[in-house]
Amino acid sequence: MKRRFYAIISGVVLLVNMQLHAQSKPAEDWFRHAVSVIEQQLAGAAKTFTPGLNPRSVTPNGMVRTAPYTDWTTGFFPGSLWYGYELTGNKELLASAARFTLALDSVRYITKTHDLGFMLYCSYGNAWRITEDKSYLPVLEEGAQHLYNRFSTKTGVIRSWDFGDHWKFPVIIDNMMNLEYLYWAGTEFKKPVYRQAANTHALTTMKHHFRPDYSSYHVVDYDPVTGKVRSKETHQGLTHESAWARGQAWGLYGYTMCYDNSRNPQFLQQAQHIARFIMTHPRMPKNKIPVWDFDVHNALASDGRAPRDASAAAVIACGLMDLSTKVKEGKKYMDYAEDILKVLSSPDFLANPGDNHYFLLKHSVGAFLYNSEIDTPLNYADYYYLEALKKYAALKKITLPLQ
């Protein structure tokens, strides 16, 4: 009797496993190759670099520029290790992710930047999401409070920078990305004012940062006393009126994420408008990897002054995949994102194992006008590329970790 019972149970388990397997799809060759490269590169990087001095980019003389814990990009490499573990199941990456994350403990005391979302939510936030280890929460709680403290009810936005003598209350489009930290922290730590601040910031930014064609300014400076706009300009784009590529990507991702957290239909509509600007832009290259600014014209491109920005492409892919799940015409967004991912996973952009100083992607641009990080690997390009692959696997029902 017992044998028959166990046979029936075994049969049921086998049937369930077969059904689950049938629901998942095998990964395409390009995806499998990308994950294989990712595992090798991240493992090599974790053995090469020192926690607290995370790889950021590569200088023109071939040296790796590292990011101390105070650098705005410092959270991306630990975050990449967490994503790498999820994609591959490699336990060594898991251990390295924890080691590089815990080295950023002192970020909890930083108060002078909005980049705490990038610095903490990408590192400690992923650590908590994956492990649910409560030891990560105090750092996240303290950092979220510091980020919220930069919100002004007079301006209706979170101050981005504390530098620059000619600005009084500068806000950059990048700041949209850090709102996710506040949305999450507002729920996790029962601070509804955090979520309210995130919503207000997004609404104010929607009002002042965007032009009629839904391209965005990089920097909007506010008067902290009256709340009025003082100036609209750029710090990293070609001109004050140009469309800096990564800035458009931040806006797309940011408003899609804000809709996901608030269900405010204005945010969804804004994300669709920004997506249309990006996807239909006449100067978007055929392979969908934008140059560093959409307004760099052919005259500049012909003399090599228009390098591509893989970091912008990776962020765009993330935003479009999220958007694809929220609207009826989502397939066009998913198809566009898939095209981007396949190009980024090709030899033109994805490094060979052991090359590229263990970074994943080639050909990104940091700040062209300052001759800083031009046509180089960037840690945030890698981070959002990994995030995009994870989103892709979920939408395509590819079982992870991929062995």
Image (cartoon, helix red, strand yellow):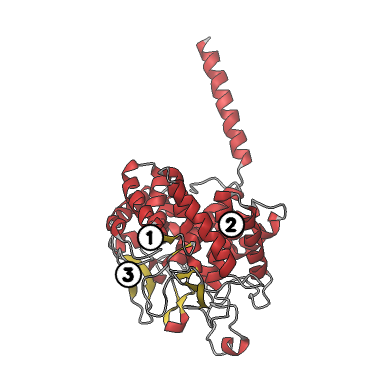
The numbered mark, 1 or 3, whose residue comes first in the sequence reads 3
Tag 1: amino acid: Met
Q: Is residue 37 found left or right of 113 in the rendered image? A: right
Q: In the rendering, which numbered label is found on residue 256?
A: 2
> Which residue lies under the disc numbered 1?
119
Considering depth in this image, is 89 or 308 the residue closer to the camera?
308
Q: Residue pushed farthest right? A: 329
Q: CA distance from mark 1 to mark 2?
A: 21 Å
Query: Does the rendering let one see residue 360?
Result: no
Q: Residue pushed farthest front? A: 226
Q: Secondary structure at mark 2?
A: helix
Q: Position of residue 290 (x, y in %)?
A: 58, 74
Q: Is residue 131 found left or right of 302 in the rendered image? A: left
Q: CA distance from mark 2 to mark 3?
A: 31 Å
Tag 3: amino acid: Thr
Q: In the rendering, which numbered label is found on residue 66?
A: 3
Tag 2: amino acid: Thr
The numbered mark, 1 or 2, whose residue comes first in the sequence reads 1
